[in-house]
Image (tube, grey):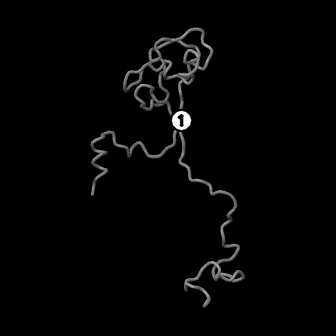
Amino acid sequence: MGDRKYRQRGYQDTDRGEKRPGQSPAARPDIFGPRTPNMPATHSVVRCAGCGAILPGEPDYAGKCPRCGFELHSCKQCNYFEPTAHFECSRPIEERVAKKDARNECTFYSPRVTIERETSHASSRSDDPRKAFENLFKK
């Protein structure tokens, strides 16, 4: 080690055949492939197209959103609503529905169900924005 410019041990100073204490081949974890990520659980929800609120349980799609009054049986709430498609619907409809947020009697209607990750509990969320803001800067 006297021929080195610096006195720190480097990668060339280790003995290749030297066995480190406390490390046996059986004690090492099996390092084959990528690690499995710890992903949060998921759940299916139906959100209102007007206000974004989660609709409770199995909502009545013939009615309105309990929070904002948006019609639930409308094009904007449908799974097949596609703004870039012909008549703004991915299904072959015969005539265009003019008001996409108004109630209609489309036979292809299917509510838009999204799969979301469960990142926090609903009980820990605060509905009061002022209280949530003050909680950010508590000491």
Q: Residue at x 28, y 52 (%)?
A: 137
Amino acid type assigned to the residue bearing label 1 in the image: Ser
- Work out whether residue 101 or residue 17 is closer to the camera in this orientation and state it: 17
- Would you identify the image quadrant in which residue 13 lies? bottom right
Q: Residue at x 55, y 13 (%)?
A: 106
Q: Quadrant of the N terminus?
A: bottom right
Residue highlighted by disc 1: 44
The residue at the far top in this view is 95
| Percent x, y of residue 76 | 49, 21
Q: Residue at x 41, y 24 (%)?
A: 65
Q: Residue at x 65, y 80 (%)?
A: 12
| Percent x, y of residue 87 | 56, 14
Left or right: 124 with respect to 61?
left
Q: Is residue 91 above or below residue 138?
A: above
Q: Quadrant of the C terminus?
A: bottom left
| Percent x, y of residue 89 | 57, 18
- Work out whether residue 100 or residue 62 is closer to the camera in this orientation and state it: 100
Q: Is residue 40 above or below residue 116?
A: below
Q: Is residue 93 above or below residue 10?
A: above
- Would you identify the image quadrant in which residue 55 lies? top left
Left or right: 19 with respect to 104?
right
SS at mark 1 in the image? strand
- Work out whether residue 112 or residue 98 is closer to the camera in this orientation and state it: 98
| Percent x, y of residue 116 | 52, 39
